[in-house]
Amino acid sequence: MYGTAKSQINSIRENKMIPLLDIDIQGTKKFLKSYPETNTLFILPPSVASLELRLRARGTETEETLNTRIGNAKSELEAGTEKNDPECLIGYRLINSDLSRAKSGFFENL
């Protein structure tokens, strides 16, 4: 199985710490059902084309895995940038176009 156990999340919270998870849109939907008070941050590239350039520059993807990741990214970006966000999935968005600006905490509060 893949994921983070509720017991791990609860243990972190009981120790007065804030759990930080790296999850996709589907995982966010599931997580918010159990922890609706959660703050969410959607980190996105400036464009799909820039994401593809970054992935190609890394040299870690085959053409097949690259195509799969780009296809997945398109649907994630669509869901993560939906203006009305009917499920209230995204609390904050950070466009990772400039690393120093992104690191300084520049984000859009919805």
Image: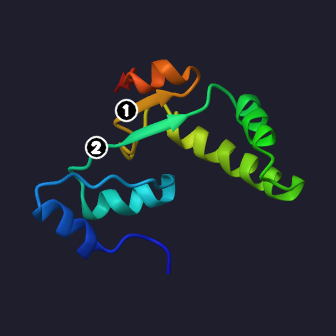
Tell me where residue 102 appears, x and y as whole percent. Answer: 46, 24
Question: Of residues 68 and 34, which is closer to you in this image?
Answer: 68
Label 2 neighbour load within 10 Å: few <14, some 14-19, many 20+? few
Work out how far the residue at label 2 is from the one at label 1, CA to CA, in angstroms: 8 Å
Using the image, determine if residue 52 lies above or below residue 10. Answer: above
Tell me the kind of residue under disc 2.
Answer: Asn
Residue 78, numbered circle: none
Residue at the (22%, 51%) spot, across then down: 18
Amino acid under disc 1: Tyr
Labelled pair 2, 1 in contact (Cβ < 8 Å): yes
Where residue 64 sits: x, y (%)? 86, 58
Q: Which of 46 and 76 is in front in this view?
A: 46
Judge left or right: residue 88 versus residue 25.
Answer: left
- Name the residue that disc number 2 marks: 39
Of 102 and 92, which appears nearest the observer?
102
Q: Does 56 sit left or right of 30 as displayed?
A: right
Residue 107 drawn above or below residue 17? above
Where does label 1 land, which residue?
92
- Identify the residue at image location x=47%, y=55%: 23
Query: In the displayed image of the protein, which residue is found farthest to the right?
Result: 63
Q: Is mark 1 on a helix, strand or loop?
A: strand
Mark nearer the N terminus (2 vs 1): 2
* Number of residues whose C-alpha sits closer than 10 Å to that of mark 1, classed few (under 14), some (14–19) or many (20 or more): some
Which residue lies at the image location 46% right of the left edge and 29% below the top edge? 94
Q: Where is residue 77 in the image (x, y as percent from the top left)?
A: 59, 39
Which residue appears farthest toward the bottom when viewing the image?
1
Residue 16 drawn above or below residue 3: above
Disc 2 secondary structure class: loop
Q: How is the image coloured?
A: rainbow
